[in-house]
Image (cartoon, helix red, strand yellow):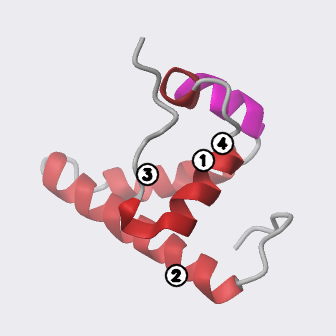
């Protein structure tokens, strides 16, 4: 697990990481059945991705979805609301 500021419930974070990895593995297996090494290759990319700043990741992937809302706010709201999360950040433009 990475050392991230503000994270204190290590077991909960590890559980979320494991669930995310299982979901990614399932996705790779079902969506790319002819690429059995895809999941492993994606995991090998993680160290490289950690060198990219969070601001760059936000700009590339989330700005169209959540606008100027900080990703930390979005993630916090998602975790606090559980499965009842709705997307209040999506603009109807």
Q: Which residue is mark 3?
A: 41
What residue is pinned by disc 2? 15
Vertical relation: 88 (above or below) 43? above
Residue 33 as seen in the image, left or right of residue 93: left
**Residue 13, placed above or below residue 73:** below
User: Which residue shows up at 35% across the image and 70% down it?
Assistant: 22
Residue at point 31%, 55% (across, down):
37
* Mark closer to the observer (2, 3): 2
Query: What are the residue bounds of the magenta stretch?
Result: 52-61
Q: Residues within 10 Å of mark 1 (few under 14, many from 20)?
A: some
* Extreme residue toward the right, this view: 5
Vertical comparison of 26 with 30: above or below = below
Looking at this rendering, what residue extends furthest in the top direction?
93
The image quadrant where one finds the N terminus is bottom right
Among numbered discs 2 and 4, the one appearing first in the sequence: 2
Q: Earlier in the sequence, mark 3 or mark 4?
A: 3
Write down the residue under mark 1: 74
Q: Is residue 66 magenta?
A: no
Would residue 37 be visible to someone looking at this image? yes
| Residue topped by disc 4 | 71
């Amino acid at each position: 697990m990475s050392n991230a500021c503000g994270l204190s419930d290590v077991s909960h974070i590890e559980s979320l990481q494991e669930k995310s990895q299982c979901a990614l593995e399932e996705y790779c297996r079902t969506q790319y059945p002819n690429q059995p090494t895809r999941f492993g290759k994606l995991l090998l990319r993680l160290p490289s991705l950690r060198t990219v700043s969070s601001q760059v990741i936000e700009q590339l992937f989330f700005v169209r979805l959540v606008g100027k809302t900080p990703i930390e706010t979005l993630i916090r709201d998602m975790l606090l609301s559980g499965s009842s999360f709705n997307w209040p950040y999506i603009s109807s433009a």
